[in-house]
Amino acid sequence: MNIRLASVRDIEGIARVHVESWKSTYDGIISESFLSHLTVEKRMKNWKDIFDNLTEDDVIYIVEDLGSIMGFVHGGKSRKPNFEYVAELYAIYLLKEVQRNGYGKLLFESFIEALKRRNYQSFMLWVLEDNPSMEFYKKLGGQYIGKKEIQIGEDKLTEIALGWKEI
C-alpha cells in the first residue's frame, strides 16, 4: 500500500474509484436511475478540469495497492466562507473492497498533514446524512456545524457539515 500525491496520470484511476464508490456507497440513498448513468468517461472529464485548474491550495492524494488506485482524497480552501473553517475536504472515496482496512484513515491523515504544511488550522466537510461513513468522520473528531438540502438527480437529500476547529 502506498499513499502519494496524485498527478494527471492518475485521472482514469481516480475517476474509476469515484464512480464505483458512489455506486456502492450511495446504493439505496441516491436513485438507481442517477447512479446507473455515472460513467468513468464523464468523471474523467470532471477530473481533467480539476487538474487543469489546480491551485496551490489544492490537495489530492491517492492510495495504491498492487499497482491500482484504491482511493483518493481531495480538498483545499473552503468553498463556504460563511463558515469559520478555512479549509475543506471536498471528497474522500475508497473502493468497497478496501474500506475498513485503515486506508481511509491514512488518506485523511495525509490530507491533514498537507493542510498543516499550508498553514491551515481548521477544516470542514459535507457528508450526506445517510452516508454510512458519517461515523468514520465523527470518530476522527468531526463536530456537527450545520446542514443543507441538496438535489442529486431526482432526489432531495440532506448534507451535514462537520468541522475540525483545530488540526
Image (spheres, grey):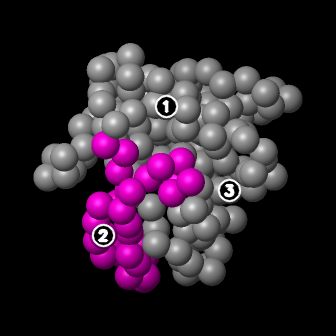
Q: Is residue 34 above or below residue 62?
A: below
Residue sitting at the far top: 117
Name the foreground residue: 162 vs 7.
162
Q: Which residue was labeled with disc 3?
A: 20
Relative to 67, is 93 on the left or the right?
left
Q: Give the main secondary structure of the magenta stretch.
A: strand
Q: Tell me where the magenta segment starts and ends, as one range.
A: 137-165
Name the foreground residue: 134 vs 97.
134
Alpha-carbon distance for marks 2 and 3? 26 Å
Q: Residue at x 38, y 17 (%)?
A: 117
First of labels 2, 3 by sequence position: 3
The label shown at residue 147 is: 2
Q: Quadrant of residue 64?
A: top right
Name the foreground residue: 92 vs 101.
101
First of labels 3, 1 by sequence position: 3
Q: Which residue was labeled with disc 1?
A: 111
Residue sitting at the far left: 82
Q: Nearer the viewer, mark 3 or mark 1?
A: 1
Q: Residue at x 73, y 23 (%)?
A: 2
Image position, residue 153 (x, y; %): 43, 76
- Residue type, numbered disc 2: Lys
Q: Residue at x 49, y 31 (%)?
A: 111
First of labels 1, 2 by sequence position: 1
Relative to 89, is 15 on the left or the right?
right
Alpha-carbon distance for marks 3 and 1? 22 Å
Circles 2 and 3 in contact, beta carbons < 8 Å: no
Name the foreground residue: 135 vs 151.
135
